[in-house]
Image: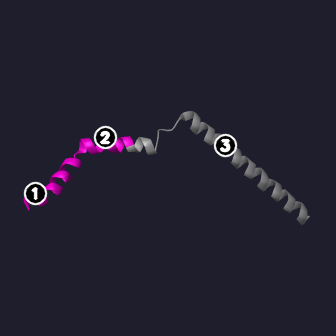
Amino acid sequence: MAMYMSFPVAVFYFFNQPQYFEDWIVKMRRELYPPLDKMHTKEIDDCIKKLHERKEKELLKALEEEEKALK
């Protein structure tokens, strides 16, 4: 009975040590969320700017057409 009760406690104690847990967490975090590359970030920002500019031009064109229709 003592073995049955102490085994889960011992396993819990062993695997919850910070040094084991921290190495595993850092490894998994880097796999799931790799550090961002500056070139990649710049490309994404440029793409977002182009999309905003295109949307703004479409809105201005639609407003001009509505303005012409009202006159």
The numbered disc on residue 47 is 3
Which residue type does callout 2 highlight? Answer: Asp
Quadrant including the N terminus: bottom left
- Where residue 37 appears, x then y in whole percent? 53, 35
Q: Residue furthest left?
A: 2
The numbered disc on residue 3 is 1
| Mark before the other along the chain sequence, 2 or 1 | 1
The foreground one among 27 and 5 is 5
Q: Please, what secondary structure does the residue beneath circle 2 have?
A: helix
Q: Is residue 3 magenta?
A: yes
- Where residue 36 appears, x then y in whole percent? 51, 38
Q: Residue furthest bottom?
A: 70
Q: Is residue 5 magenta?
A: yes
| Mark before the other along the chain sequence, 3 or 1 | 1
Q: How many marks?
A: 3
Q: Nearer the viewer, mark 3 or mark 2?
A: 2
Q: Is residue 39 left or right of residue 62?
A: left
Give the Cα distance between marks 3 and 1. 62 Å
Which residue type does callout 1 highlight? Answer: Met
Which residue type does callout 3 highlight? Answer: Cys
Residue at position x 18%, y 57% in the image = 8
User: Does residue 11 lie above or below 19 as drawn?
Assistant: below
Q: Please, what secondary structure does the residue beneath circle 3 have?
A: helix
Disc 2 designates what residue? 23
Give the Cα distance between marks 2 and 1. 30 Å
